[in-house]
Image (tube, rainbow, N blue to C red):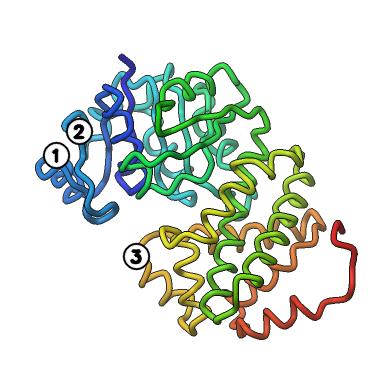
Amino acid sequence: MNKVTFIGGGSFGTALAILLANKGYEPNIWDREEAVVDEINNKRTNSKYIKDVIIPSGVTASNNIEDAIKDADFVVLTVPSHIIRTVCKNFKEFIPKKAIIVNVAKGIEEGTNLRLSEIIKEELPNNPVVVMSGPTHAEEVAVGLPTTIVVSSEQMDKAELVQELFMCDCFRVYTNDDLIGVEIGGAVKNIIALVAGVSDGIGYGDNSKAALMARGLMEITRIGTALGAKPETFIGLTGMGDLIVTCTSMHSRNRKAGILIGQGYSMDEAVEHVGMVVEGIKACKAFHELKDKMQVSMPITDNLYDILFNGKDPKVAGSDLMERDKKHENH
């Protein structure tokens, strides 16, 4: 049976490890925090990241990266997007050349504007890279509630191996050869989810959120197709599917942070209150820079950027979005 190692013992890494253990695998989780590792091994819980879930005995955890990753067939990166390069660089000497790298983080790199698969390829040029993305909150995956996800790669035969690895009766895995679209859809939807949370925090209604989601999907499609993605990808799981769940669920860190910002909290206060990485903040900064380079119109992203980094009042941002010049819906 294949050896699978998860780099990062957060909520989604733990949830996917539970899924594999329930399929009969014996996955290993590496995490830098000794307390997390000890709790997984000794109490069969991970209360810091995923509460009220018992972790099967087949899952083990380790602080020793060399032991954790030795002979791994699949190395699953379940760390935040902004440390993907650092993790790959620091651990490359331990990663087996045969291992398929599976990335579940969503975002692009600030400064370079590289997609995460491109970063991984730079640091680990000998390893095939597969991306997983879709509407999969860890809290539901961990307890076996039905969900679906997409895998993509430049080497689709490797994506099919990852599909086979994770596919089960509660976790349906599709393949999609549009790697750019899969990655961009998963990254930009975090920006829109933050804005949807801001709307909720202000006290706007369901109509407002529906409008933000629909127009947000347009922004995802605009920047994605400008980068070479297929437009149809964004009406699928990694576009519309992920957007719906992240904008509406209270499992969403981005929505939670947005609600607090809409209620008057600062960005830093909101992040501290959520207690975990809010990917939409870094995505907003990165895509605000990228869309200017690409000359792509993203007014929702522009206004969120001003709220987060220039102190713009969220209600003023809402008014500015509503009062823009008239235009055709498809432009």
Looking at the image, tell me whether mark 2 or mark 3 is earlier in sequence order: 2
Q: Are marks 2 and 3 in contact (CB under 8 Å)?
A: no
Looking at the image, tell me whether mark 1 or mark 2 is earlier in sequence order: 1
Helix or strand or loop: what does disc 1 sit on? helix
31 relative to 327, above or below:
above
Q: Mark 3 points at which residue?
A: 275
Residue at 47% x, 59% y: name it: 249
Residue at 66% x, 27% y: name it: 177
Q: How many marks?
A: 3
Which label is found at residue 306?
none
Residue 151 in the image: x percent, y percent? 55, 31
Residue 170 visible within the image: yes
> Label 1 is placed on what type of residue?
Asn
What distance separates the C-alpha of mark 1 from that of mark 2?
A: 6 Å
Q: Do the residues labelled 3 and 1 touch (CB within 8 Å)?
A: no
- Nearer the observer, 113 or 144: 144
Q: Mark 2 points at which residue?
A: 60
Helix or strand or loop: what does disc 2 sit on? strand
Q: Mark 1 points at which residue?
A: 41
Q: How busy is the neighbourhood of tag 1: few (under 14 within 10 Å), some, or many (20 plus)?
A: some
Residue 164 in the image: x percent, y percent? 45, 20
